[in-house]
Amino acid sequence: SEPNQFCDAGIGYDESMCGIPSSASSKLLIKGGTVVNAQHQEIADVYVEDGIIVAVKPNIRVGDDVTVLDATGKFVMPGGIDPHTHLDFEFMGTETVDDFFSGQAAALAGGTTMHIDFVIPVDGSLTAGFEAYEKKTKKSCMDYGFHMAITKWDETVSKEMELMVKEKGINSFKFFMAYKGALMINDDLLLEGFKKCKSLGALAMVHAENGDAVYEGQKRMIELGITGPEGHALSRPAVLEGEATARAIRLASFVNNPLYVVHVMSIDAMEEIAKARKEGQRVIGEPVVSGLVLDESWLWHPDFKTAARYVMSPPIRKRGHDKALQGALSTGVLQLVGTDHCAFNSTQKAFGIDDFRKIPNGVNGIEERMHLVWNTMVESGQVSVTDYVRLTSTECARIFNVYPRKGAILAGSDADIIIFNPNASFEITAKSHHSRLDANVFEGKKGKGKVEVTIAGGRIVWQNNELKVAPGTGRYIKMPPFSYLYDGIEKIDAAYLSSLQAPVNRAKSAS
Ligand SMILES: NC(=O)NCCC(=O)O
Ligand SMILES: [Zn+2]
Ligand SMILES: [Zn+2]
């Protein structure tokens, strides 16, 4: 038979399961489901035309030209938004196996309809990095946005940040406090970067680990003859994550700009965030699904191939950190869940067979996040269904300033929707996943709840366990600066300035 032009031969699923996605101009009616937004849930129909939600209300009547999906007894929720992914990422001497087609196809099969990936500058150049990622994303089959890493500092970078925000639709910049000799920056750059972010209304993000101390810890392990994956955990303990988180928080407070801490993996980091938030500081904490449901014991597995799969940074921590992060998510200390999907297969992980420092860092999650968060947080009773929507979609849209276009089932929002059956079940296996990875760190995990239908931009892309995706159908979503996190910042600045001025004035008038 004719090869299916809409399937990528390299992708890890049967080509016969792919098809042509239904046209974006088709009309859809989702009938009788419980529509869930972050604030409210109600039984209603959802009517979609040309990729946009047109109406949300009970008993919508339509003509014969409309595709009707029955959602009785099921939840109709905004598609997931993953705030943290690395597709087609060149890192540690290799490149992730998932690109902007296979990674997104996997995401859609798991109910995620938008993700935000990290553009890495080329030799420090933001413009060159942006252009490189524009090429990588040509094959996209779902909507995506960009954060951008800042890896060096000079006048050109400062001007390029302005260009990225004002013209290219980027409203967040990531600073790596780890990966010494590669992506890592120092406190001097962190301060300059924070100040620039603030002037642009962009969100500063940090990978918070003390990179100098990690480097020292790694040397120690090698000197002790500890070369296996357990050395990864031993060389970068939670205290180094806590220290860097605290430092970034204090520097952000000094500049008075909002801060986003990516992949919060430890109690140590989480408690720093809790403390700062209690004092009124605007700090967002993002746990990732691997940190919420896995523990460090995998890194001690006697089989290198198995253990190496779990190497990511900061490391997956000892049992107890996972539960504490779940608790922090349920009580509002942490605000949204990402994945840090960064897929390296067994051959790539084997680069570090004799030295854990050479194991490419990263685990999967883009396809599994929605199911695992449901099972871990909702099925266990820790959060409500509306909270689930907030944690997996709405809060991300708000933080990155694309709400309510994204993250909501409202008239006028993009038709990025999932139909979720709370009475069905899921099971994760590398055999059935859609990533190009040859293994899955969540292998064998099963639970209740299943994404039965994914609609992205008005197209049914996942139904009856079949993907219908086409390269080139995903859109770049520009994200404007000055999200709600910036509301009132200037008033706090003014109060701070007058608090500095007052004692100076008093001293002057007393003299
Ligand atoms: N996290 C990880 O191990 N790999 C991806 C790069 C990063 O986010 O630090
Ligand atoms: Zn990171
Ligand atoms: Zn990452």
Image (cartoon, rainbow, N blue to C red):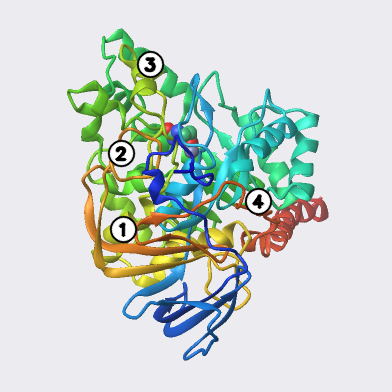
Residue 13 visible within the image: yes
Q: What's the CA distance linking mark 4 and mark 3?
A: 34 Å
In the image, 339: left or right of 280? left
Q: Which sits earlier in the primary sequence, circle 1 or circle 4?
A: 1
Q: Which sits earlier in the primary sequence, circle 3 or circle 2?
A: 3
Q: Which residue bears the numbered disc 2?
A: 440
Q: Residue at x 66, y 42 (%)?
A: 194
Residue 327's disc is 1
How dense is the environment of label 2, judged by Cα within 10 Å: few (below 14), some, or many (20 and up)? many
In the depicted view, which residue is nearer to us: 153 or 2? 2
Q: What's the CA distance linking mark 1 and mark 4?
A: 34 Å
Q: Which sits earlier in the primary sequence, circle 3 or circle 1?
A: 1
Q: Which residue bears the numbered disc 4?
A: 476
Residue 23 drawn above or below residue 351: below
Q: Quadrant of residue 346?
A: top left
Residue 432: image location, x then y, percent = 30, 45
In the image, 259: left or right of 366? right
Disc number lying in front (1 or 4): 4
Three-letter residue code for mark 4: Tyr
Quarter placement of the N terminus:
top left
Contact flag, marks 3 and 1 (Cβ < 8 Å): no
As helix, strand or loop, the secondary structure at mark 3 comes to helix
Three-letter residue code for mark 1: Gly
**Residue extending furthest toward the front:** 1
Disc number lying in front (3 or 1): 3
Q: Which residue bears the numbered disc 3?
A: 351
